[in-house]
Amino acid sequence: MNPRSIALKQGSPLRAFLTPRWLFTTLLVLLAAMVMVRLGIWQLDRLEQRRARNALIQQAMGLPPLDLNQANPSDWNTAIYRDAIVTGKYDFSSEVVLRNQVWENRPGFHLLTPLLIEGRTQAVIVDRGWIPLEDGDPSKRTKYAEEGSITVRGRLMPSQQTRSLGGAVDAPRGRLDAWNWIDLPRLSQQMNVPIAPLYLITAPLNGQSLPARSLPEPDLSEGPHMGYALQWFSFAFIFLAGYPFYVRKHLRSSPS
């Protein structure tokens, strides 16, 4: 009898392993490990994207303020988190408010007002800061109006996207006065002129109490992606390294 016949004789561990049940289980383990490795690689890709984003933000924050009255359309593409300066007039007829804003533990709104850029046929949405909840009605917001030509300094920010899961959602159509997100494409539907692809958060002014203003600091951390990647790679290793021991133990304990 040749060695192959001996190895595959009835009741041998190898023969028991070469059954549809064990072959199918092995295939599932290999597929699971492949998926885990792919998820780990995906997290590493996310990490590189995060690092590239952080580098762009740091570069933008190190640049001199962008003059929006002189800016070219291409300048907007790389201006996220860049300081900016603009001169124009506010269009209070199109002003709206942003819900669920807090200042020193007090609930309120942020004023979102389009500023008609001087010398341009375009406006930029300006986040003028926080006001108390009781002043959110349009008739009460008039006391915060800044009339005439004005020069505004602040930081450019990207449009916010409505979260697909959880959180309040703004109606896709119709005119809204109170918003949950600064969704610029959606806001543009009710503006009198075209609006810029970024919005401007105003810098704090000395001696001004309301609207209350602060510039957000970007999150430049690398996030949890490296930790997630290591977890997925560890799971794949456990599956691949532990499976042979499991099979061996199971076959040894099985009746001949």
Image: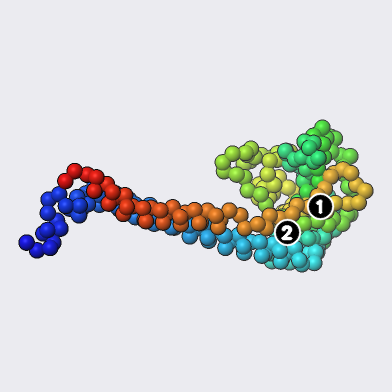
Q: Residue at x 69, y 62 (%)?
A: 57
Secondary structure, mark 2, is loop
Left or right of 87? Residue 180 is left
Q: Residue at x 71, y 55 (%)?
A: 218
**Residue type, numbered disc 1:** Thr
| Residue 158 position within the rendered picture, expressed as x and y whole percent measured from the top left | 68, 54
Most distant residue in the top direction: 134
| Residue 199 position within the rendered picture, expressed as x and y whole percent measured from the top left | 74, 53
Tag 2 residue: 81
Q: Residue at x 60, y 44 (%)?
A: 163
| Residue 41 position within the rendered picture, expressed as x and y whole percent measured from the top left | 48, 60
* 78 to 157, vertically: above or below: below
Task: State which quadrant residue 133 falls in.
Answer: top right
Separation of residues labelled 1 and 2 (CA atoms): 12 Å
Task: State which quadrant residue 210 falls in.
Answer: top right
Q: Is residue 114 visible?
A: no
Tag 1 residue: 202
Left or right of 14? Residue 246 is right
Please give the count of numbered marks on the rendered protein. Answer: 2
- Work out whether residue 110 or residue 88 is closer to the camera in this orientation and state it: 110
User: Disc 1 vs disc 2: Cβ atoms closer than 8 Å?
Assistant: no
